[in-house]
Image (cartoon, grey):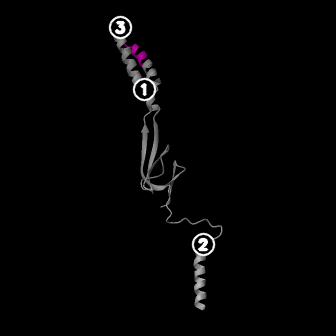
Amino acid sequence: MRSMFLFAALAFCAVAAAQPLPGAPPVPAEDAACATCGVVESVRHVEKKGEGSGAGLIAGGVVGGVLGHQIGSGRGNTAATILGAGAGAYAGNQIEKNVKKKSYWVVSVRMDDGSSRSVTSGARPAFRQGDRVKVVDGNRLALLAH
């Protein structure tokens, strides 16, 4: 009889120890898969050259033509004007593209389920290759403790 009472008391203690205390946060299961977790595969800086709208081309052509017209006289003046306009148009277009270029960071993540995701950021991310991260709100990353 005594051994049954001792067995019942041990069983009760084991069940009570497995239950969380009232008001305590739930303990996450170790084996539960995180659907939005993964490992950083790469962090790349990307510069995308802007596209010219034609404004730089026209403005550069006008300025180049005016400057070219200041050189020489007669046929030389005409040639200098045409050359100045062409060179100015090219330079103006390149300047416009450079002003409109975009720069951003791309973090590639290999998700726990085997898929890949890329998250872009305007600022340099704090993550490195091999860091364990979680995708938050579909477009941000949070570093997970190792």
What element does badge 3 sit on?
Answer: loop
Residue 77 drawn at (x, y percent)? 36, 11
Q: CA distance from mark 1 to mark 3?
A: 29 Å
Q: CA distance from mark 2 to mark 1?
A: 70 Å
Label 1 neighbour load within 10 Å: few <14, some 14-19, many 20+: many
User: Which amino acid lies under the numbered mark 3 shown in the image of this protein?
Assistant: Gly
Q: In the image, what residue occupies the spot 58% across and 90% down?
A: 3
SS at badge 2? loop
CA gap, disc 2 and disc 3: 99 Å
The residue that mark 3 highlights is 74
| Among the two numbered marks 2 and 1 on one chain, the one whose residue lies closer to the N terminus | 2
Q: Earlier in the sequence, mark 2 or mark 3?
A: 2
Magenta segment includes 25? no
Q: Please give the residue where the numbered disc 1 appears in the rendered image.
A: 93
Q: Which residue is mark 2?
A: 19
Q: Which mark lies nearer to you, 2 or 1? A: 2
Measuring from the top left, give residue 83's x and y in whole percent: 36, 17
* Residue 84, quarter of the rendered image: top left
Which secondary structure, mark 1? helix
Is residue 12 placed above or below 68 in the rendered structure?
A: below
Asked whether 70 falls inside the magenta stretch, the response is yes
Amino acid type indicated by mark 2: Gln
Which residue is found at the position 60% from the left and 80% from the top? 12
- Residue 117 placed where, x, y %? 45, 49
**What's the magenta region?**
64-71
Within 10 Å of the Cα at label 2, are there few (<14), some (14-19), or many (20+) other Cα atoms? Answer: few
Choose top left, top right, bottom left or bottom right for residue 9.
bottom right
